[in-house]
Amino acid sequence: MFIGGCHLNECHYITDGNFSALGNVYILKKIIERIGLNPDRLRMESMSAGEGIRFAEVMNEFSKQVLDLGPLGKGEGMDEDTLKSRLEAVKSLVPYIRLVERERLRLPVKTEQAYRKFFTSDEFNRVFDETIGEKLAIGQIISILREKPLTTGEIANALGLTPSEVSRHLITSSRQRFVRFDESLKRYALA
Amino acid sequence: MEKEQMEEQISKCIGEKNFGDVMVVGGGISGIQAALDLGTAGFKVYLVDKAPTIGGHMAQLDKTFPTNDCSMCIESPKFNETARHPNIEIITYTEVDSVEGQSGDFTVTLKKKPRYIDETKCTGCTVCTEYCPVVYPDQFNQEISKNKAIHIYFAQATPLVSYIDDSCRYLKDKTCTICQGVCKSDAIDFTQKPEKMEVKVGAIVLAPGFDAFDPKLRQDYGYGVFENVVTSLDYERLLCATGPYEGEIMRASDKKHPHKIAWIHCVGSRQVLEGGNSYCSGVCCTYTQKQVILTKDHDAEAECVIFHNDIRSYGKDFERFYQRAENLPGIRFVRSYVSIGKEIPGSKNVTIRYATAESGVKEEEFDMVVLSVGLNPPADALKMAETFGIELNNHGFCKTNPFNPMETTRPGIFISGSFQGPIDIPESVVTASGAGSQCGELLDYRRGELSTERVYPLEKDVSKEEPRIGVYVCHCGANIGRIVSVPSVVDYARTLPNVVHSDESLFICSTEAAAMLAKDIQEKGLNRVVVAACTPRTHEPLFRETLREAGINQYYFEFANIREHCSWVHSKEAETATKKAKEIVRMAVARASYLEPLEEFDLPVDRRALVVGGGVAGMTSALSIAKQGHEVYLVEKASDLGGQARRIHYTLEGMDVQAYLNDLIRKVYQHPLIHVYTDATILDASGFVGNFVTTVKSEGRITTIKHGAGIIATGADVYTPSEYLYGADDRVMTHLELDEAINNGSEKVANAESVVMIQCVGCRNEDRNYCSRICCTESIKNALKLKEIKPEIDVYILFRDIRTYGFKEDYYREAANNNVRFIRYEPESPPVVEAGESDEGKQVLKVTVIDPILVKKLELDADILALAAAVIPSADRKEIANLFKVSLGPDEFFQEAHVKLRPVDFGADGMYLAGTAHYPKFISETVSQAYGAAGRALTLLSHDTVVASGSVCEVDESRCISCGACITVCEYGAIEFYNSPTGRKARVNPVLCKGDGLCNTKCPTEAIVLKHFNNVEMASQIDAAFAEL
């Protein structure tokens, strides 16, 4: 997906919505990466109406890149069902993502540098992991547990997470009574 | 003429062809603005331009400083607005022959040059240009590239019709009529002769603009001799994507990209030589910086050297712009006079000789040299003065009233734009609105008599019907048709869901096609229309209009852009372009099926105005609005009117400010429609365009004022210096205090033998990163006055850059000639002041400064030290900004809606801005802006209603969870909570909503929706894009 917008600080509206878009793109790239897709599939560029040549260059470059990456999911070696379920998981999180964006990820200063600095900082990574990252992981865990009970190691393998991350999420979700540990199977299952 | 007689004449003339209210002469940005304001304020306007199109110089510029907005992109929407305006008639390729009569009753004779084109038939398809065999230098591109004898002046020309130049073969020897053969509209008419016509109007606005200084006449710096020396205007075209090399900067000699470029400042300006101009052209420093920044955008490796005198970054945000240019890598600013050396044989590079304090005289080679040429009065200014019966000043610009830069010596004739002297685009726009307001004062009695408003048939409700879509595919002459197979797109459209009719048109924008479209809507029962043609930016209003005229809701229209988005960019891929055109049409049709009818509604307008601030700006605005029949509430926080002007006694030009001010105050108090509130504080302000409510406490009484428009004219303050012993030693004062002391005949001044002035105190530093604009002039004014009273007095001015822009430069020169000593200092080593003793044992202030040219310490003895203290934003700015929901800029002066084209409007509709609240400025500039703000306010107040767009946000209350996410992002303040029967819900005030849709992306429950761009409409379009996947 390509998002084109006016140069930052040159918004037609006083709301400077292109900064909002920029923030969303940073968050979304992180999400895309987290669900196992290539974040290069999303690109945002600022340009003015007078930069036709640049627009053409960027489009040609991006379309070549997209062709190289191959179809969504397939390029990443993901089967279609997994792809669909992961995208569905993200979609169902949209209201939550919007809340987190508002409460934790909105910057007071509208400059490109400030945005780059924040969204590449450890602080952003930490907040993301605590909020959207955790919800995403739990969502994915629940969706694979729906098929059959699994061990921590099996879950970690399936989702590309470390066992310690998985057990942290499992503890949280057990507390919230989404999952339970089935003593007989020695595996986690849906609660 | 008596009013009754006049009215009688008007009623006789209504319906008569050549009768109007105001004629605007000159269709540059200033003339366009004047015409738009006057037309909207209810006057019938003739806009006359001698060029084949409106647009003026602004159309030639690549970008505009200090925002680097694309010049054409911001100007061309105004062309369309002007062309579509029911009260404006554009007459191009026409000059004024004579002006008879008097204010209120002028008879203007116009001479229209033959275009050899029937304007009513030409569709602007440019097929003729393609076939024309005659090539001649393109004037729009500064004669760098070639055009044809028959052509459209530039792609966005208005009117968009061709004209034939004298170089045409038929006109020369009747040997060629190819264009007649290829024109499908039969628009070429070689029988046209110059036409004379008479137009009667009540007032005239002259906006002839300027002419760029031509260095060819004196062969300045080798221009016209050396191929790689160009003027700054040539360079604008080189930079521009629509320029001679399509945005590539190339040298004339070898069509190679220059990598090392020099700019030479002040070409034709600030010189008292024969053929030069003594004044400063004011705009060149900053446009040079813009060109440097753009050059680096084109070629990051480029090496740019700017040879300059003082850098005059005196405008709003100019200082930052200067720093931006200065801080780019590979940029050198060199303060030196220069002379051109030679052209190197072979490479055709050019050398420049210059001198610096560090390294003496040097000669350096450049690939290209750009001359930053100044602004001349229009070449035909003398003839114009004669025709219009007005006087010129000693520089050849228009002579104006020093306290009113728009007033000429002939009543009823006003000027706007750079005919008053060298000014930039925002000032040209300000004076246009200002001249408009003064025409309004003169002609208020006949406002609305000649204006027309469109009447539409009653709208048919088709919302319950199944979609019946009509698709029209346009050839756009050959623009689309030659690449895209239009018939196959038409056929394809018929196969799409809900399409019941599909047709092609040579020009769907022509009047005949519009009539056909309207007929189809009625006869074939179409209830949605898709036009596949050009850009909605220019043409959507036209088609919406057509739908309204055919009796269906205008929002049932969808545009498919198959020109800019298709044929123009895929000219070498006809087959795939056709496929893409079909896809674009498919997307448009998909969206059209889901379009909903939206209501634009009329809101009543309260015809009264509120003016906040009773200084020169506020009083001038209030008077101008009151003179046009509207009640004005003038609110001043002090106990009397007058503002900062009370502290100024004379202007640089010697005008008596106090006499002027007292007269203004008297007029304000005497005007029956102006209600003055002094000692006033504003307790509350609410409402929106046309319907504001402001609560004012004045002298213990609280009043609630209802008003339709508001003007913020709250002025500025003067910085209280903490440096240079100010406050600690009573010989140290500000420049305003010195002005006062001189005029009071103070003993301190009478006894002084030596006065030192320090410039830039409290600004152009980290705390205040802007130039206060007026202080150089203020100090020079004081210096000249001191020298006048006491010729033997020593006056020293310690400065960083002397910024006496425009005609003020003459006074700088006069001061230098009168032995006022100017000593430059660098900000890194500011002057040092301490109390001490002179060699004669007198108690003095010792001022030490390092002269960067002599590189030595100078020690000056001063009896008086005058500090040019900064102009700073007024103390109550934040309060005012919060109350009226208007914004402040980075330096906390009030922020206009658009720096260039809406300089006195706020982003919030119905609020306007004037005077030093906007930025430091002189009284004459304040007056211009005050009239400008009044003129803009009148475009609103002269109507009973204001129309609000239908494409605004709306809340689905059942989904709203009252989280306030939408409210926090809406900087227009359009969303508020209210208590609904089911609890607290967000509600959109459609009048304040600008339809940017940011709130939509923040709402966690998707409860808030932007109408006309809702999810279903957008998703249907995206799904259709990938329908084949």
Image (tube, rainbow, N blue to C red):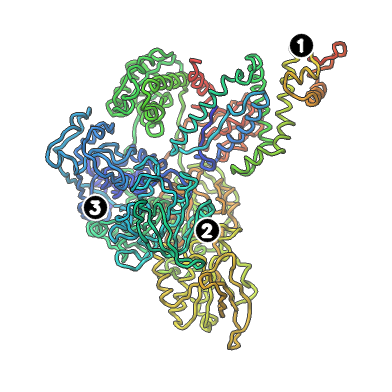
Horizontally, residue B906 falls left or right of residue B846, namely: left
Query: In which quadrant will I find the N terminus of chain B?
Result: bottom left
- Same-chain status of marks 1 and 2: no
Residue B796's label in the rendered image is none
Q: Quadrant of residue B732?
A: bottom right
Camera-nearest residue between A147 and B377? A147
Camera-nearest residue between B682 and B388? B388
Q: Residue furthest right?
A: A183
Residue B106's label in the rendered image is 3
Please identify, in this view, whether the residue under mark 3 or under mark 1 is nearer the observer. Answer: 1
Q: Residue at x 60, y 26 (%)?
A: B1007
The reply to whether the C-beta atoms of the residues labelled 2 and 3 are less than 8 Å apart is no
Mark 2 highlights which residue?
A: B715
Horizontally, residue B25 falls left or right of residue B238, namely: left
Residue A65 visible? yes
Residue A148's label in the rendered image is 1
* N-terminal-most mark, 2 or 3: 3
User: Amino acid type of disc 3?
Assistant: Phe
Q: What is the crowding at mark 2: few (fewer than 14 residues within 10 Å), some, or many (at least 20)?
A: many
Q: CA distance from mark 3 to mark 1?
A: 92 Å
Q: Residue at x 30, y 55 (%)?
A: B224
Q: Chain of mark 1?
A: A
Horizontally, residue B456 falls left or right of residue B185, namely: right
> Which secondary structure lies at badge 1?
loop
Q: Chain of mark 2?
A: B
The reply to whether the C-beta atoms of the residues labelled 1 and 2 are less than 8 Å apart is no
Q: CA distance from mark 1 to mark 2?
A: 73 Å
Q: Quadrant of residue B581?
A: top left
User: Amino acid type of disc 1?
Assistant: Lys
Above or below — where is A56 with respect to A180?
Answer: below
Camera-nearest residue between B314 and B130? B130
Q: Quadrant of residue B987?
A: top right
